[in-house]
Image (spheres, grey):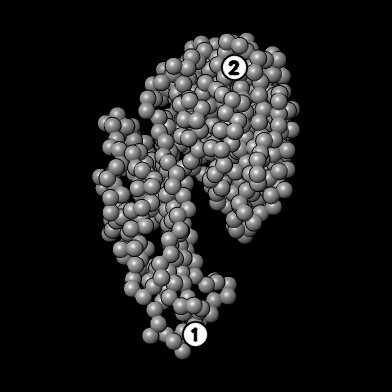
Amino acid sequence: MTFAHRHGPACGCTNEKGEPLFVTAPSEQTQKALDHCEKNMRHWLSELENLVKIPSVSLDGFDRKQVELSAEATAEALRRSGLEQVELLSFGDVHPYVYAEWIHKKDAPTLLLYAHHDVQPPGRDEKWQSQPFTPTVSSGRLFGRGAADDKAGILAHIAAIGSFLKTSGELPVNVRVLIEGEEEIGSHHLGEFVRRYRQTLNADAMILTDCANIDTGIPSVTTALRGLVALDVELESLSHPVHSGLWGGILPDPVLALSKLLGTLTDAEGRIAVEGVYDDVRPLLELERKSFESLKMESLARRATGLHNDLPFTVPEINFAEALWRAPSLSINAIQSGSRKLVSNVIQDGAWARVSIRIVPDMKPQKVLAALEAHFRKHVPSGFKLSLVPQAAGHWWCVDDLNAPAYQIAARSLEKGYGRTAQFIGCGASIPFVQPLSEELGGIPAILVGVEDPYTNAHSENESLDLEDFRKTLLGQIHMLADFSKYKRS
C-alpha cells in the first residue's frame, strides 16, 4: 500500500474550485495519531484480514460457532487497541454482540461507535474469483466476504482508537464501542438489547461505519435510508406435482399464475401499481432536487452494476438519485417452484416468491404492507389457494437538518482524511435499527459513514474493499474523534 500524503499544516487539499478545504493544523495529539496510523497501515490491514478469514454468517443453517469465534476475535482486536471493559454480550440464542469502552474524560462528549461482525452467506462459489473467506489483494482492492461490509467498519474504529491510545495514552473523547452480531439477519433483537443495556450505551452521538461513499475517493455522509417491507406470496393448486403429459391442458399451472400475479405489481412505465403506495411519499425540497440533479448517477450506476443495455423503462419526472434514494421501489427477491437441478416434465403443485418494497419518508411500513397484501388478494387468479406471510416492515430514516453541528463535524472530518469535499448522500438500502436505536438513546444524532463504494459488491460474490479508501477512512475517523471533542449536544 502507498500513502499519498498526510494532513498536516502544509496540506494543500482544496475543493473543486481550488479553495482550501481547511486551514487549521491538527493538534499535536491528533498529528501523532495520524502518523502512527499511516506507519501501521499494514498492521490494520492484517487485523482486517484476520477477521475476514472467519465465516461469521449469521443466517440460520450456518455454523453459529463461527459467529461466536468472530465475536471473540473482534473482542481481542478491541483489547489490542487499548480499549477497556471488553466483553461479549448476549441473551437467549442471540448471536453475540461485542462491547468495549474508554470513559475517562469527565467534561468531554461520549460517542457510541457501531459496526457489525456478522456477514452475508458467500453466495455462489463458482462466481468468486478467489475463495470468499481467504482475503486476497488484487488491483488495489481486498476481496473477501465481509471485507467491506462490515469488518472494515470495525477496523475504522479500532485503528482510530488505537492510534490515539498508542501515542498519547488517551482519547480526545469518551467512547463506547458496540459491534453487533446479527445485523445481516435484520437486527431483530437490537431493540431488546438496547433496552437491557440502556445505561451502558448512553452517548451524545453515534457513529456507524456501515455505509458507502458515492464513489471511490469521495467521502460521503449518508443522510437518508429507505425502509423495507417484505412479503412472501405463495399460490397452490394441487396436493403434489403431476405429470404434465397426463394432465396438462386441464389443470391450472401455479407458476404461470404466480408470474401473472407478480406482473400486476407494476405498470408499463415501471411504477408500482399497488394502490395508495405513493400517497405518503415526502416531496423533495428544491435544494435537495438541485443537489440530486448535479450528481452523475446514471453513468455511475451503469459502471457499478454492469447494466448491458438501455433501461426497459424510465420514470421521466425523477432523476436517478431521486429514484434510488427518495422514491419507493419494488423487487422480486426470489422465486421458486420445483428444482432447477432436478427438473422434470411436471405441473408444479405450487409457486412461491419473496416480494419487497423499499419505502421512503413519510411512508408507513404497516400501511404499505397492508396495501401489498390487499393487492394480492384482489388480483389472485381463481382456482388457487393464496398464502401471504409478512417478513419485514422496517422504517425509513433521514436527517432533518444537514446544518446541525454533528453532521457538519462529520463532513469536515472526512474531508481532512480524504483531502476532498464530502458529499451528503442518500442510500437506497435499509438499516432497520438506526431510527429505533437513535430514539431509544434519547434522539441522539446518527452519523452514517463507511468504506463501501459502488464496486464493492456487498451481499454478492467478489465483495471487495478499495484499499486507498480504507486508508483515508482510518485517517478520517481519527479526525472525527478529535473534532467531536468540541461537540455540545443540544
Please tell me which residue is depicted at 59% across the width and 55% down the height of the picture: 123
Q: Residue at x 57, y 10 (%)?
A: 107
| Residue 228 appears anywhere in the view | yes
Q: Residue at coordinates 34% horizontally, 35% vertically from top-left?
A: 292
Sequence-wise, the earlier of marks 2 and 1 is: 2
Of the residues shown, which amino acid type is indicated by label 1?
A: His
Circle 2 SS class: loop
What is the three-letter code of the residue carrying label 2?
Val
**From the image, which quarter does the N terminus lie in?**
top right
Residue beneath disc 1: 243
Which of the pair 66/394 is nearer the observer? 394
| 65 lies above or below 47 | below
What is the x, y in percent for residue 105? Answer: 62, 13
Pointers 2 and 1 in contact (C-beta within 8 Å): no
Q: Secondary structure at mark 1?
A: strand
What residue does disc 2 label?
173
Relative to residue 317, is residue 242 depicted above or below? below
Residue 77: x and y, percent? Answer: 72, 32
Viewer-proximal residue among 461 and 384:
384
Which quadrant holds residue 112?
A: top right
- Between 264 and 465, the one nearer to me in the picture: 264
- Gap in Å between the C-alphas at discs 2 and 1? 70 Å
